[in-house]
Image (tube, grey):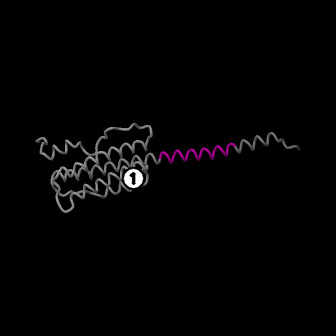
């Protein structure tokens, strides 16, 4: 009996195409899952970092303006940094590092004394405001490169005129 070569070749070709398709689909699917995981993990880490930074910055600012020793809870901030270090883009990590440097400068103001001079706070506050905006824009781009650059981030360090007004005692009476 003669082997029908045409039938054999088409069958082997069909099997080979199916195997290649399954492998290629698995690779593409896995890459898609990895990208989705990274996107979700980055979003959560960025959110956690911004929340922790906000809490630390506000406590330091309030302590400075109220002329008291800060009661910063560092654990959430440090945990957020650990999470961020796992998934942050290089640009976002650099922006977070700048925030950390400025937070350290802010805490140094309290070492051994109670700071009262707004001129000491102004460059740190301005730096935090700028670093926060840089972090937000870097995070937005790492999550979706088509995101537009924002000129002003919501949240974060308040406007300087609000800090000066509070320090002068211009706050509204209850």
Main secondary structure along the magenta-highlighted residues: helix
Give the total number of marks visible in the rendering. 1
Q: Which residues are magenta?
A: 17-36
- Decide if residue 7 is on the left or right side of residue 120: right
Q: Which residue is rendered at x = 28% and y = 54% of the image?
A: 103
Residue 109 location (% of width, % of height): 22, 57
Does dot 1 land on a helix, a strand or a loop? helix
Q: Which residue is rendered at x = 31% and y = 45% of the image?
A: 130
> Is 157 or 94 nearer to us in this picture?
94
Name the residue beneath numbered marker 1: 84
Q: Quadrant of residue 77?
A: bottom left
Task: State whether residue 162 is above or below residue 75.
Answer: above
> Is 138 or 7 nearer to us in this picture?
138
Residue 100 location (% of width, % of height): 32, 54
Q: Quadrant of residue 166?
A: top left
Magenta includes 157? no
> Is 109 or 33 nearer to us in this picture?
109
Magenta includes 25? yes
Check disc 1: other Cα within 10 Å, few if <14, some if 14-19, many if 20+: many
């Amino acid at each position: 009996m003669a082997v029908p070569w045409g039938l054999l070749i088409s069958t082997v070709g069909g099997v080979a195409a199916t195997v290649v398709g399954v492998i290629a689909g698995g690779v593409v699917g896995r890459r898609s899952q990895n990208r989705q995981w990274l996107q979700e993990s980055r979003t959560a880490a960025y959110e956690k970092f911004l929340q922790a930074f906000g809490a630390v910055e506000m406590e330091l600012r309030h302590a400075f303006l109220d002329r008291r020793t800060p009661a910063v809870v560092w654990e959430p901030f440090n945990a957020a940094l650990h999470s961020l270090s796992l998934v942050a883009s290089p640009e976002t990590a650099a922006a977070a590092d700048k925030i950390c440097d400025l937070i350290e400068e802010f805490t140094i103001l309290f070492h051994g004394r109670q700071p009262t001079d707004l001129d000491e706070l102004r460059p740190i506050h301005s730096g935090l405001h700028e670093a926060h905006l840089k972090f937000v824009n870097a995070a937005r781009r790492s999550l979706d490169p088509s995101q537009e650059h924002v000129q002003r981030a919501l949240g974060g360090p308040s406007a300087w005129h609000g800090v000066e007004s509070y320090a002068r005692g211009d706050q509204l009476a209850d």
